[in-house]
Amino acid sequence: MFKRDDLTGLALGGNKIRNMEYIFGDLLDQGCDSVITTAGVQSNMCRSAAAAASHLGLKSVLLLRGSGNEERQGNLLLDELLGADIRFINTQDPYDSRVPIWLEEVKQELLSKGHRPYILHLTAITSTIATIAYVDASEELVVQFDKLDLEPDYLFLTVGSGITMSGLVLGLKHLGRTIRVVGISGSAQTEFLSERIVGYANQAAEMLGLPTKVNTNDFTIHDQYIGPGYGLPYTPVITAIQKVAQLEGILLDPVYTGKCMSGLIDQIELGKLSRKHCVVFLHSGGVPSLFHQHKTITSQIMKS
């Protein structure tokens, strides 16, 4: 069973659109007229921020990790179509100590031009706001489960930064649901992600005034499906994308949801899951990456 967060609207949707609803609410409450954010060249988050800004008539500045020579494809193409002010920064490390400095420099530039800028950086307070968006989503899920008279055993989703998972773990635990949230990592190791998820969840609980606290026993993360690295698809991932496309007419991406589906399929083949289990798969979007990775995907399809 799919939870279709790839259909959340605005520029091909995805889980980041839920985040933007809350983040841009905070932005508008502060009287800002522009947003500055940063991530990789093919970032779903940057594309979503540019879409939200465009929709609201605000300026967006994207500091993308890259050289500027990258192919105008996938999310980068959409960023340009959405009218974002795109700039490139010389790092591939999202935790590079220079990134906050570069963000602040752009903020000062916009201030000097009369703008009221908002820095959207998911290592700062906006991570807590984004987590709350998925606490809200957990309530939506529970309403849908009850309407369908379902009590699912597992909720599978891809883990990137851990924000989506942290909100769902907190929300479902607070609502007293026993569904096990299982994350398939797209890049980072379990220990690193677990610490971040607990931190995000408990910061969100504090902001919301919830008594519920999250610990590492409340969820499961598998990091054995990362493959050769972040954003690098491999055979089981492309096979999973093909299988879902042909059986369901649903498109997954090679960076996140394809890896999650390949992990889910492997868990079934290992006997960890069976037909007696009710599994919900959160489709968190990311479809533009299909086009960015078209050469790798096409090569694999032709070999099969």
Image: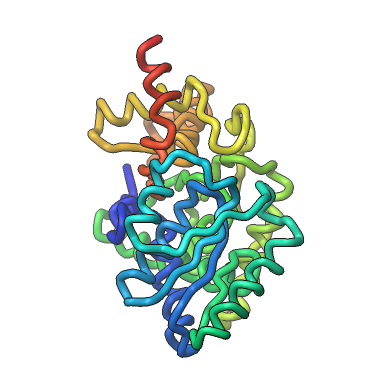
Q: Nearer the viewer, residue 127 or 110?
A: 110
Which of the image's four quarters has the N terminus?
top left
Query: Which residue: 45% across, 24% down?
Result: 296
Q: Nearer the viewer, residue 7 or 183?
A: 7
Q: Is residue 126 above or below residue 195?
A: below
Left or right, 212 with reference to 279: right
Query: Which residue: 28% across, 30% down?
Result: 245
Left or right, 271 with reference to 224: left
> Does residue 176 appear in this view?
no
Colouring scheme, one of rainbow, by chain, secondary structure, one colour? rainbow
> Does residue 94 appear in this view?
yes
Q: Is residue 194 above or below residue 71?
A: below
Q: Is residue 215 above or below residue 204?
A: above
Query: Which residue: 41% across, 17% down?
Result: 299
Q: Is residue 224 above or below residue 68?
A: above
Q: Position of residue 212 (x, y in %)?
A: 60, 72
Q: Position of residue 194 (x, y in %)?
A: 68, 52
Q: Position of residue 5 (x, y in %)?
A: 35, 54
Residue 242, quarter of picture: top left
Query: Which residue: 49% across, 38% down?
Result: 255
